[in-house]
Image: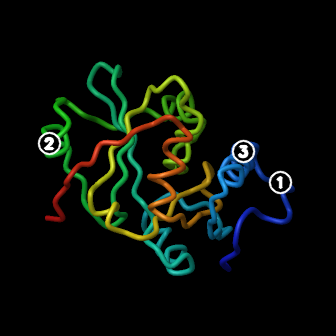
Amino acid sequence: MQLSQGRPADLGGRLDKELRTYDFLDRLGISYGRVDHEAAMTMEACVAIDQVLGTTMCKNLLLCNRQCTDFYLLLLPGDKPFKTSILSKQIGTSRLSFADGEYMERFLDITPGSLSVLGLMNDWEHHVRLLIDRELLDSQMIGCHPCVNTASLSLSTRDLIDTILPATAHDYTVVDLPRA
């Protein structure tokens, strides 16, 4: 694995959703580092990728209420544990659970294992509410997938907040999840 800047020179064999992600970032004038790698399905698989990117990959969780009427994309540091009850109290909902992969595909055009904040560019009907752990907002850089799990990007947190999210017409809610 090696760190590259921007979109790949050779676009052959890449999925359309990945190419649309690079087009989106380039259109916004966002600088990003990129690493191509084997499919990374778990946070543990991202450890070596994190070292090359020089950042910590975000843990991305798609959650929903019991009725599957409200959906949340939670971004938190990859090494931070997630406790449903604490998050539920902070956002005023109960019975949060992990959303089925079909919702990832329908709302964000992302398959399980590839979930990324960049998928919000596909959520023009605003089915998904973004939640960001406060600790991530204190980081200079974040790591995420370009809507596929065979590449990873490093992005400026400021670019995410100030440029990328407004371009997707999504706001975010800050949550404070404990480490212990």
The CA span between labels 2 and 3 is 36 Å
Labels in figure, total: 3
* Left or right for 84, reference 31: left
Q: Estimate the x, y position of residue 55 in percent, counting from the top left.
A: 46, 74
Q: Secondary structure at mark 1?
A: loop
Amino acid carrying label 1: it is: Gly
Q: Estimate the x, y position of residue 10 in percent, counting from the top left.
A: 86, 63
Q: Secondary structure at mark 3?
A: helix
* Left or right for 72, reference 96: right
Image quarter where the N terminus lies is bottom right
**Label 1 CA crowd tier, 10 Å (few <14, some 14–19, many 20+):** few
Q: Estimate the x, y position of residue 148 in percent, counting from the top left.
A: 63, 51
Q: Nearer the viewer, mark 2 or mark 3?
A: 3
Q: Estimate the x, y position of residue 43 in percent, counting from the top left.
A: 43, 63
Residue with the mark numbered 1: 13
Task: Report the disc number at residue 20.
Answer: 3
**Residue at 52 percent of width and 39 percent of height:** 120
Residue with the mark numbered 2: 85
Q: Nearer the viewer, mark 3 or mark 1?
A: 3
**Residue at 54 percent of width and 38 percent of height:** 168
**Residue at 13 percent of width and 64 percent of height:** 180
Amino acid carrying label 2: it is: Ser
Work out whether mark 2 precedes mark 3 in sequence or the reverse, and give the earlier one: 3
Q: Kindly check if marks 3 and 1 are in contact, taking CB atoms under 8 A apart as contact.
A: no
**Label 2 CA crowd tier, 10 Å (few <14, some 14–19, many 20+):** few
Vertical comparison of 95 with 177: above or below: above
Vertical comparison of 3 with 63: above or below: below
Work out whether mark 3 precedes mark 1 in sequence or the reverse, and give the earlier one: 1
